[in-house]
Image: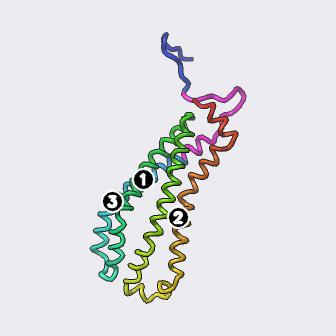
Amino acid sequence: MTSFPPGVPSVPITTRPPLGQAPSSWPMVIGILAIVFGVMAMIQSLFAALSPIVLNAVGRLMPKSQAASLAVAQKWLWWTYASGALAGVLGLLLLCAGVSILKRRRRAARLVRAWAGLKLLYALLAVAIGFFMIPDQLAAMRQDPNLAKSPVLSGPLVEVMMFVGVALGMLWIAALPVFMLVWLGRRKIKEELSSWS
């Protein structure tokens, strides 16, 4: 046992379960999951910052018939930047929450709840902007002579498919925050969280 000099309090690194009871394993699983998704979101943010370079390179290689698609991408470039910045901030918040969960810190619950609420707001914003982008994307595809002849583009099916895709995107974005909120809302988990330092 380590003895501390007088006046230096001993602070446990983690909370210990009562004698005879093994520590729960969920903090390791949930913490690592949060860290992995947080890092992935921060990587997405970096890719968003590089998107103008990619757009310029792709624009030089694209045939003139697809110029309208490039123009749509340029028009909505601001959302690529904003979305990337939001993803980076949310990713950092999730990373901090994951580390706090691994260390079994009480603040982990607050961080996860803050991240989940902001992530759900981000999902709603992404869906709203997605609905505004669809008409521009369809118009650009219909200007391409190779795609304009397609019977799929002339009917309403492609619009329905695009709207369904945006709605499914919302469900995908919201899945992890909803799971985390439900998990942390369980009575047994709340009791354990309250015992953390």
Disc 2 residue type (three-letter)? Gly
- Dot placed on the residue nearer the N-terminal end, 3 or 1: 3
Q: Which residue lies furthest to the top in this view?
A: 6
Q: Quadrant of residue 60?
A: bottom left
Q: What is the CA distance from the residue labelled 3 to the residue labelled 2? A: 23 Å
Secondary structure under the numbered disc 1 in the rendered image: helix
- Crowd around label 2: few <14 · some 14–19 · many ≥20 (10 Å): some
Which residue is pictured at 51% across the width and 59% down the height?
124
Q: Mark 1 points at which residue?
A: 86
- Dot placed on the residue nearer the N-terminal end, 2 or 1: 1
Q: Which of marks 3 and 1 is in front?
A: 1
- Crowd around label 3: few <14 · some 14–19 · many ≥20 (10 Å): few
Vertical order, 96 against 10 (above or below): below
Q: What is the CA distance from the residue labelled 3 to the residue labelled 1? A: 15 Å
Q: Mark 2 points at which residue?
A: 169
The image shows residue 74 at horizontal and vertical percentages of 32, 68
Q: Which residues fall within the magenta stretch?
A: 13-32
The image shows residue 137 at horizontal and vertical percentages of 41, 75
